[in-house]
Image (tube, grey):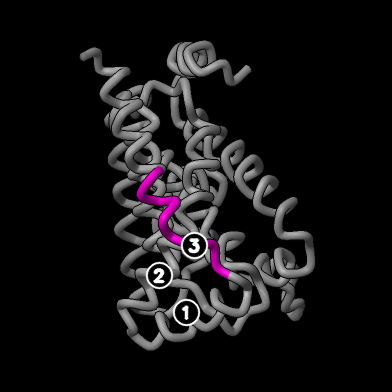
Amino acid sequence: MANSDKEQTTLNLYIQRMAEHPLLTPEEEKELAIKAKKGDKEAMKKLVEGNLRFVINVAKNFIGWGVPLTDLIAAGNLGLIEAAKRFDPDREVKFISYAVWWIRQAIMQTIFQQTGAVRIPVKESLFISKVKETYERLKEELKREPTIEEIAKEVEASPKKVRNALQVVRMPLSLDKPLGEEGEDLTLLDLISKKGTEDVEKEVVEESLHKELNSLLNVLDERERIIIEHRFGLN
């Protein structure tokens, strides 16, 4: 049996099993999220299972990127689980609107790991490692997410270069970080909760995907960037 046939069979069996899990009502979802936050593993399991369908929808956007759909779905499921662990049910936002960030990041990481499409120069790799270590150290010392400017000061580099490095290692974006100037408390999570969830889910996937791709391309030289753009049709 050809690999494509095996993949299709595996996918069909997975979809059949997934269909056994009922869709959650908003009330059920919030109740499960509250229990999951308190450490209820069964509630966590049901919350994840009730949203598996959405992972497939996100994964379909990456068909043709050199990774089998089944692998994309598996990666997306890991992102969904991570989102379930971090989700705060006290915020007025639909769970899947929050989870789409984690699903996408997990899928993107798998794509670049499996295809080996992006080979970052040694000098840039060392800088990225330095930024990552600094990020983790400052987060521990400050007991909060360090700002781009704080990291840039420590590594003696421009905020733009630090921002690109953080995108490459796919540090999770803080949805609770204020979007405005000092004194303005509006966060990305607040913004999401004020918009239609269906539109937000689509916008979040597309916008964050473009930003991450641009950041990845920024660390490559011109020749490598052109190759990647043509390979994946990014231009």
- The image position of residue 18, as x and y in percent, is 40, 51
The residue where tag 1 is placed is: 32
Q: Residue at x 57, y 16 (%)?
A: 233
Eyeballing the image, is 200 above or below 29?
A: above
Q: CA distance from mark 3 to mark 1?
A: 14 Å
Q: Which mark is residue 9?
A: none
The residue where tag 2 is placed is: 46
Do tag 3 and tag 1 residues touch (Cβ < 8 Å)? no
Do tag 2 and tag 1 residues touch (Cβ < 8 Å)? yes
Kind of residue at badge 3: Pro
Where residue 5 sits, quadrant-wise, is top left
Q: Residue at x 53, y 50 (%)?
A: 54
Q: Is residue 144 visible in this depiction of the protein?
A: yes
Q: CA distance from mark 3 to mark 2?
A: 9 Å
Q: Which mark is residue 22?
A: 3
Tell me the quarter of the image containing the N terminus.
top left
Q: Is residue 124 visible in this depiction of the protein?
A: no
Tell me the quarter of the image containing the C terminus.
top right
Q: Residue at x 53, y 40 (%)?
A: 212
Other-residue count near label 3 (Cα within 10 Å), few / some / many at <14 / 14–19 / ≥20: few
- Residue that protrudes farthest toward the bottom in the picture: 38
Tell me which segment is drawn in magenta. 16-24
Q: Say which of 46 and 172 sits in front.
A: 46
Q: Helix, strand, or loop for circle 1?
A: helix
- The image position of residue 37, as x and y in percent, is 42, 83
Q: Say which of 111 and 187 sits in front.
A: 111
